[in-house]
C-alpha cells in the first residue's frame, strides 16, 4: 500500500516551504511526493529543489511543465505521475495538520466505499493567524459546506448535492488510485470547460456513493490576496450587491455549461440521471433570465422552487428579484 502527494505550484515562493515542512513532518510518512510547477517566474522552483536536496528526499520529485497549463491542467499533470494507491491533493500555500495523512488513510482503509475523502479546514490568513468564522445556520466547514454535519462525523455526499456544490477545497482531498484512473481521460473536457478538477473527482466518486466528507479540520487553509484558486479573500457587505450583471451572467453560464456536460458525458444511475436533467433545465432557464433580467423569465424559474432554493438560496433568489426589478444599481457595492 503506497501513498502519494500530488502538489501543484505556480509562483508560490511566499508560502511553499511551510507547506513542504508540513508534508515532511507528517506522523504517517508518505511514500512519494510529485510536484508539478506551472512555469513559475519567481523563486518557487529553486526553493523546492533546494529543499529536496537539503533533506535528501529521494522520493520527492519536481517537474516543470513545458508550458503554462493553468491550475486544472497542472493538477492533471501531477496526477498522471503519481503512482500511489492513495493520492493526497495539495496546494502550495496551506499547512497540513501533522495527523492528516494518518487519519484520512485510516478512514479509507477501514471503509472501502470511500473513493474521495474530503476533510474540513481551519482558515488562516497570509501571516498564519487563524481567521475567526461564525457558522451560518445549516452550514459547516467554515461556511464552505451548506450541510449540517456534526464535528468528527463522516458522511456520504450524494449526487443531487454534488451537482450544485462542491464539498471542500481540493487540497483537503485523498482519492483512490481507481478514481484517479477513471478521472484522467476527462482531462481535455475539464481543462476546456474550466470544470474544477476536485469538483469533478467528487462527482465521479459520488456516482458510486463514494464521495465522503470528514468534519475534522486537517489543514490550515490559507486565505490571502494571492490565492490562485479556492475561496477568495473578500469582505462581505450586508445589504449590498457586489456582483455586476456581467459577472452574474458569467456565473450562470458556467453552471449551465457544467450541467450540460454532466448530463451528456456521464452515465448516472437512473434516479440521479433524472435529477441531473431537472437541474440542467433549471440552469438553462436561469441563464435565459440572466441574459435579459426579464421579470417574466424569472417567474418561469419558480416552477421547481426546491432546485432554485437549493442552488442559490434565499439570498440569491432575492438578488435575482432585485435585478429583475432594476433595483440592483441602487444597492451596488461601492
Image: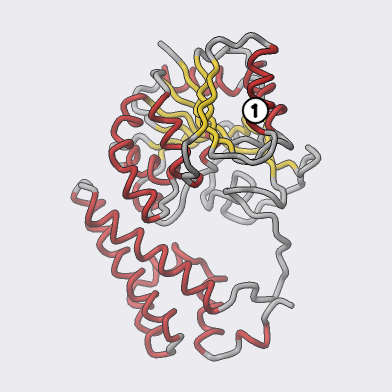
The image shows residue 327, relative to residue 229, as above or below, that is below
**Mark 1, residue position:** 96
Of residues 147 and 71, the one nearer the viewer is: 71
Residue at left offset 47%, top offset 17%: 3
Nearest the viewer among 34 and 267 is: 34
Q: Where, quadrant-wise, is the N terminus in this rendering?
A: top left
Q: Is residue 272 left or right of residue 232?
A: left
Kindly state the secondary structure of the residue where label 1 is placed.
Answer: strand
Which of the two residues, 77 or 329, is positioned nearer the viewer here?
Answer: 77
Q: 303 and 243: which one is in front?
A: 243
Compared to 117, does 51 lie above or below?
Answer: above
- In percent of width and height, residue 22 lies at 67, 23
Q: Quadrant of the C terminus?
A: bottom right
Residue 215 vertical placement versus 97 (above, below):
below
The number of numbered discs placed on residues in the rendered structure image is: 1
Could you say where residue 332 lies in the image, as x and y percent from the top left?
67, 80
Q: Residue furthest front?
A: 66
In the image, residue 265 lies at what x, y percent? Answer: 23, 51
* Left or right of residue 116: residue 16: right
Residue sitting at x 35%, y 22%? 112
- What colour-coding does the image apply? secondary structure
Residue drawn at x 54%, y 79% as measured from the top left: 245
Q: Is disc 1 surrounded by few (<14), some (14 to 19) or many (20+) residues within 10 Å?
A: many
Amino acid at each position: 500500500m503506497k501513498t502519494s502527494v500530488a502538489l501543484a505550484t505556480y509562483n508560490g515562493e511566499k508560502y511553499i516551504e511551510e507547506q513542504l515542512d508540513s508534508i515532511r513532518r507528517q506522523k504517517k510518512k508518505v511514500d512519494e511526493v510529485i510536484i508539478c510547477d506551472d512555469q513559475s517566474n519567481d523563486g518557487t522552483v529553486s526553493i523546492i529543489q533546494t529543499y529536496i536536496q537539503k533533506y535528501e528526499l529521494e522520493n520527492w520529485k519536481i517537474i516543470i511543465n513545458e508550458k503554462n497549463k493553468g491550475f486544472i491542467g497542472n493538477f492533471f499533470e501531477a496526477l498522471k505521475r503519481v503512482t500511489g494507491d492513495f493520492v493526497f491533493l495539495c496546494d502550495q500555500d496551506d499547512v497540513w495538520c501533522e495527523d492528516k495523512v494518518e487519519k484520512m488513510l485510516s478512514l479509507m482503509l477501514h471503509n472501502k466505499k470511500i473513493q474521495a475523502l474530503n476533510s474540513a479546514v481551519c482558515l488562516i490568513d497570509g501571516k498564519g493567524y487563524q481567521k475567526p468564522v461564525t457558522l451560518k445556520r445549516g452550514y459547516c466547514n467554515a461556511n464552505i459546506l451548506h450541510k449540517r454535519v456534526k464535528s468528527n462525523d463522516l458522511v456520504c455526499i450524494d449526487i443531487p448535492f454534488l451537482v450544485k456544490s462542491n464539498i471542500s477545497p481540493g487540497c483537503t482531498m485523498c482519492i483512490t488510485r481507481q478514481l484517479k484512473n477513471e478521472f484522467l481521460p476527462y482531462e481535455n473536457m475539464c481543462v476546456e470547460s474550466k470544470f474544477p478538477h476536485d469538483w469533478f473527482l467528487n462527482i465521479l466518486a459520488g456516482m458510486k456513493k463514494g464521495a465522503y466528507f470528514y468534519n475534522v479540520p486537517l489543514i490550515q487553509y490559507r486565505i490571502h490576496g494571492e490565492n490562485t484558486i479556492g475561496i477568495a479573500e473578500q469582505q462581505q457587505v450586508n445589504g449590498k450587491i457586489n456582483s455586476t450583471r456581467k459577472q452574474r451572467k458569467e456565473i450562470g453560464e458556467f453552471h449551465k455549461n457544467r450541467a450540460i456536460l454532466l448530463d451528456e458525458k456521464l452515465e448516472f444511475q437512473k434516479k440521479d440521471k433524472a435529477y441531473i436533467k431537472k437541474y440542467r433545465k433549471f440552469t438553462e432557464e436561469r441563464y435565459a433570465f440572466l441574459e435579459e433580467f426579464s421579470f417574466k423569465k424569472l417567474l418561469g424559474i419558480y416552477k421547481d422552487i426546491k432546485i432554485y432554493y437549493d442552488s442559490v438560496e434565499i439570498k440569491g433568489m432575492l438578488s435575482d428579484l432585485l435585478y429583475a426589478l432594476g433595483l440592483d444599481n441602487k444597492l451596488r457595492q461601492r
